[in-house]
Image (cartoon, rainbow, N blue to C red):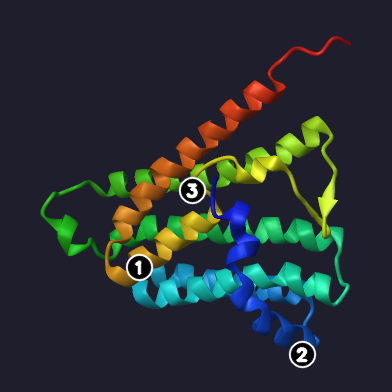
Amino acid sequence: MNITSIRHKLTGWLDPFILLLSKTGITPNQITFLSFLFGMAAAACYLTTHFIIGSILLAVSGILDLTDGSVARLTDRKSDFGAIIDWVVDKYVDGIVLLAVGLSCFVSVPAYLAGFNIPQIAYIGVAGLAVIGSIMNTFIKPVTYAETGYTAKDDGKISDPLEGVGFFGRPETMLFLIAGGLFGFIWISITVIAVCTNLSAIQRICYLWKRHGGYKNE
């Protein structure tokens, strides 16, 4: 179980905003691009240790990411490209933001860690593990769909039980990053993300082994 599997139950408060966006004439792909721009702005702020502003911008990016698909369905502008670019933009934002936090150690080390004399390479390593875990945790899904021939869609988006497998997905990553930046424990957040995304990926692999691990007789 993860937030993604119950997302539709938690995002009803966005309905007025989605309705407003649908009336402006903005396209779903333009919303996705705006989400990307806010994500890159958040990364720039994280890189320069402006973590509070970065977290606010990342929250805006996340909200826009939650709305593009709904606007596409509401305005009948669903497209395969839109679904694809949404995945791609998500991973660009995740990877660059996490990497930006890692590189921020060259600008400033948090006071609560300064006394430990931790080598900068260690900060980069933790951020790198977070990037790998975040990307692989998601990459497993399209690979599974492609290899198993799963093509069923729900409202224009692939919907599969794998959505509910793995305890730590993109929403959890975003929430930990935003909270860490706002409340001053960004490196604790990055460490949790590094550990939990990779464990979640392993959880999904174990699930797939049980479900698809048998040999095929051709």
Say if mark 2 contacts mark 1, CB within 8 Å: no
Q: What residue type is labelled 2?
A: Thr
Between 80 and 150, the residue placed more toward the observer is 150
Judging by the rendered image, the residue that carries numbered circle 1 is 181
Point out the image quarter for the C terminus: top right
Please tell me whether mark 1 or mark 3 is closer to you in this view.
1
Picture quadrant where residue 147 is located: top right
Please tell me whether mark 3 or mark 2 is closer to you in this view.
2
Judging by the rendered image, the residue that carries numbered circle 3 is 131
Judging by the rendered image, the residue that carries numbered circle 2 is 24
Residue in the image at 77% along x and 56% along y: 84
Between 47 and 71, the residue placed more toward the observer is 71
Dot 2 or dot 1, earlier in sequence: 2
Between 161 and 117, the residue placed more toward the observer is 161
Residue in the image at 57% along x and 41% along y: 136
Q: Where is residue 122 in the image (x, y as percent from the top left)?
A: 29, 44
Q: Where is residue 157 in the image (x, y as percent from the top left)?
A: 79, 55
Element on which disc 3 rests:
helix
